[in-house]
Image (cartoon, rainbow, N blue to C red):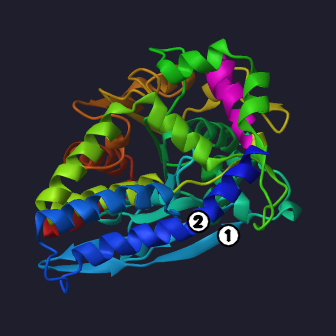
Amino acid sequence: MIYSAYEALRRSTRPMAWLLDQTQKLARDERNPLHDTFTMRALATFAELPARALKDYRKPKYEIWEELGDLEVVIDEEVEHSLPFADLLRFDMDHSQSKPKVMIAAALSGHYGTLLQDTVRGFTQDFDTYITDWKDARQVPLSEGEFSFDDYVEHLIKFIEHLGAGTHLVATCQAAPPAMVAVAWLTKHRPELVPASLTLMGGPVDTRVSPGALNKLATKLPLKFFEKNNIHTIPRGYPGSGRRVYPGFYQLSGFIALNPMPHVKQYKTFIKSSIKGEGAPQQKFRDFYDEYFAVLDMTEAFYIDTLRKVFIEHHIPKGILEFRGEQIDFASVKNLSLLTVEGANDHLCPPGQTEAAHDVFKGIPPRRRKNYVQDGVGHYGVFSGSKFQSGIYPVIRDFIRENLPAGKAKAATKEVAQV
């Protein structure tokens, strides 16, 4: 009922959204002789704000490029392998086939994989880079069946099987727990395909450690509360009509409510820069929120499974997690190098929650394990921004290179020296 009401409201406001958008464009149009006056800038600002509030935010495009001197060459993605609920995308660069393979497991937590564009840009410099591009549940027909936590794990396993031995796995945010399960399952059933290294970035491995507001809320409310209040049926007009989901607009509202002050500051800054006519800050604001407000629906099964196993019952740190009815033995993982990365100011996944993976994978020798905490970054700073590029990415890059086979490691070192 709520989803239908939301959709009806969205559709009814399309004319107003169009009118407001046209107003701000006309006020800023350089052909308007008054466009650079205070009055026009103020009109444009206060037309754009509600226009953006009513705007439809569709899945952004990946904008990945390689810097070649003074030129920026765009790297197009290609679908390497397709499954019902996700595509494995590859960012093809010259000579990338000779580089080590890195598969980035994107979180399925409301945003598209495009939120990791900065992450991808980093890895494409040095690796043959792939990413799991999860599909909006609204766009997946009911005939494709359900999608649960186990199905997420199975998608990862199938993608790794497709890429083959020697793949390095990098899991971001909520992708960390299923990535751990996939590695442990492969250790038992397909040891030749166990990733050469596993990097977990800002992932909720053990949310009992330094619990944040979201973690505390999950443990105080019964699971039935979330099932009753957060799960809704996709209305008519979408391929996935009739599917029960946790809507993306719910997740977005939760993200903002959990930490509203940064967004308030961003909007205040936008208003000031817009009225002053400062173009660069305005565009930076638009680019960020065009990405941040683009959200997808998650299936009921995946949302409830993740909530129960990861945030409420803590299956992984307790050693009770099952995959397809089989008990997962994390301690059996030995031939793997593990890196955990955390942000010192991460309020969604506080320091210690990801590092807990080292206690879970206790069979990995200490010399093959490392934890890195980046000062001065919050949750999204773990995956993007200047400190990711200058601080975090080099740590991950060097860790992966340290765990390459001798021949490939030598080739990688030679390539860097040539650059």
Residue 2's quadrant in the figure? top right
User: Does residue 287 appear in the picture of this structure?
Assistant: no
Whether 236 is drawn above or below 390: the answer is below
Q: Quadrant of the C terminus?
A: bottom left
Left or right? Give the position of 417 relative to 7: left
| Residue 184 at x, y percent in the picture | 65, 37
Mark 2, other Cα within 10 Å: few <14 / some 14–19 / many ≥20? many
Instruction: Please provide the residue range marked out in magenta.
Output: 302-318
Kind of residue at disc 2: Leu
Left or right? Give the position of 369 relative to 68: right
| Residue 338 at x, y percent in the picture | 45, 36
Q: Are marks 1 and 2 in contact (CB under 8 Å)?
A: yes
Q: Quadrant of the N terminus?
A: top right
> Pointer 1: what residue?
82
Q: Secondary structure at mark 1?
A: strand
Task: Depth check: give the residue in front, 218 or 272.
Answer: 272
> What residue lies at 38% left-to-right and 47% top-to-bottom?
403
Task: Depth check: give the residue in front, 87 or 317.
Answer: 87
Kind of residue at disc 1: Ser
Mark 1, other Cα within 10 Å: few <14 / some 14–19 / many ≥20? some
First of labels 1, 2 by sequence position: 1
Task: Depth check: give the residue in front, 331 or 38.
Answer: 38
For residue 88, the mark is 2
| Residue 262 at x, y percent in the picture | 31, 36
Residue 202's quadrant in the figure? top left
For marks 1 and 2, give the CA distance. Answer: 6 Å
Q: Secondary structure at mark 2?
A: strand
> What residue lies at 35% left-to-right and 65% top-to-bottom?
124
> What residue lies at 48% left-to-right and 72% top-to-bottom?
18
